[in-house]
Each structure stands twice: as structure tokens, then as C-alpha cells.
Image (spheres, rainbow, N blue to C red):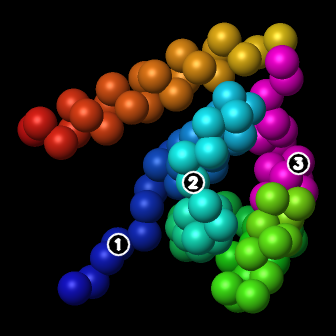
């Protein structure tokens, strides 16, 4: 099965959802999802030094995921949301979940 890379907008959306997840303190994802998101982003021509480092982490390096993810989001301008924007983050997460549910029904 040949999987196509995510479109750039979808890869950025995936990274943004991880940022929102962290800002809302709803740990829905583990280290493997952060690494996969980095790989998807690189395949979609989104690049930064820390994103490459994150994509290359092995299972024995999972303790480094959060720090490298934060660095890559800083490099890409997708900084973690501030407490002032937490309501915006929660609405973004709710819309994302609604889109996921709607996509499964189609």
C-alpha cells in the first residue's frame, strides 16, 4: 500500500493540533504521534532543524520529544498557545474533533 504524503496544510494542521493538545493539557498523544507528525511535516516540505531531529528520534529517546517538539514549533512560528488563548485552543480542538467525526460518517 503506497501512502501519499499529507498535503502541507494538513501537516501544519496536525502540528497545530498537537500544540493545542499540549496547551489544553489534554495529553491525547504520546511520543510516537509527535515523531509521526514530524515525519509527515517533512514529507509535506515543512522543514526546520528541530523538526528533522524530532523525526529522527528512536524509541530510546522518547524522553526528548517534548523539548524538541517545542523547539521545532518555535522555529516554525507555531508557538505554544498562551493561557490567554486557551479558550481559542479549546474551540480549535472541538472543531478538529467534529471534523474527525464528520469525516468518519462520510
Q: Which mark is in front, 1 or 2?
A: 2
Magenta region: 69-83
Magenta region, main secondary structure: helix
Direction from residue 34 to residue 77 in the image, left or right: right
The N terminus sits in image quarter: bottom left
Q: Earlier in the sequence, mark 1 or mark 3?
A: 1
Residue 91 screen position, x and y as percent? 54, 16
Q: Residues within 10 Å of mark 1 (few under 14, many from 20)?
A: few
Residue visible at 18% across and 42% down in the picture? 104
Q: Where in the figure is residue 87, as x and y percent of width and height?
A: 66, 11
**Label 2 crowding class (10 Å Cα cut-off): few <14, some 14-19, many 20+?**
few
| Sequence order check, earlier mark of 1 and 2 | 1
Comparing labels 2 and 3, the label whose residue is closer to the camera: 2
Residue receiving disc 2: 29
Which one is in front, 76 or 15?
A: 15
Query: Residue shown at 11%/36% (left/top)?
Result: 105
Residue at (43% x, 61% y) in the render: 6
**Residues under labels 1 and 2: Cα distance?**
23 Å
Is residue 72 visible to the viewer in this orientation of the structure? no
Instruction: Say the numbered circle drawn on residue 74.
Output: 3
Residue at image mark 1: 4
Q: Residues within 10 Å of mark 3 (few under 14, many from 20)?
A: some
Which residue is more in the foreground, 88 or 51?
Answer: 88
Vertical placement of 92 versus 21: above or below? Answer: above
Q: Quadrant of residue 65?
A: bottom right
Label 1: which secondary element: loop
Question: Sequence-wise, which precedes: disc 2 or disc 3?
Answer: 2
105 or 25, nearer to the observer: 25
Q: Which x, y percent locates residue 86?
A: 72, 17
| Mark-to-mark CA distance, 2 and 3 | 19 Å
Residue 56 horizontal side relative to residue 76, left or right: left
- On the image, which quarter does residue 4 sit in? bottom left
Amino acid at each position: 500500500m503506497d501512502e501519499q504524503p499529507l498535503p502541507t496544510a494538513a501537516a501544519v494542521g496536525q502540528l497545530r493540533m498537537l500544540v493545542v493538545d499540549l496547551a489544553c493539557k489534554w495529553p491525547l498523544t504520546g511520543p510516537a504521534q509527535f515523531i509521526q507528525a514530524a515525519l509527515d511535516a517533512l514529507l509535506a516540505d515543512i522543514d526546520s532543524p528541530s523538526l528533522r531531529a524530532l523525526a529522527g528520534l528512536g524509541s530510546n529517546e522518547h524522553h526528548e520529544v517534548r523539548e524538541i517538539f517545542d523547539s521545532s514549533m518555535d522555529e516554525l512560528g507555531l508557538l505554544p498557545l498562551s493561557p490567554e488563548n486557551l479558550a481559542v485552543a479549546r474551540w480549535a480542538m472541538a472543531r478538529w474533533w467534529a471534523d474527525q467525526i464528520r469525516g468518519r460518517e462520510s
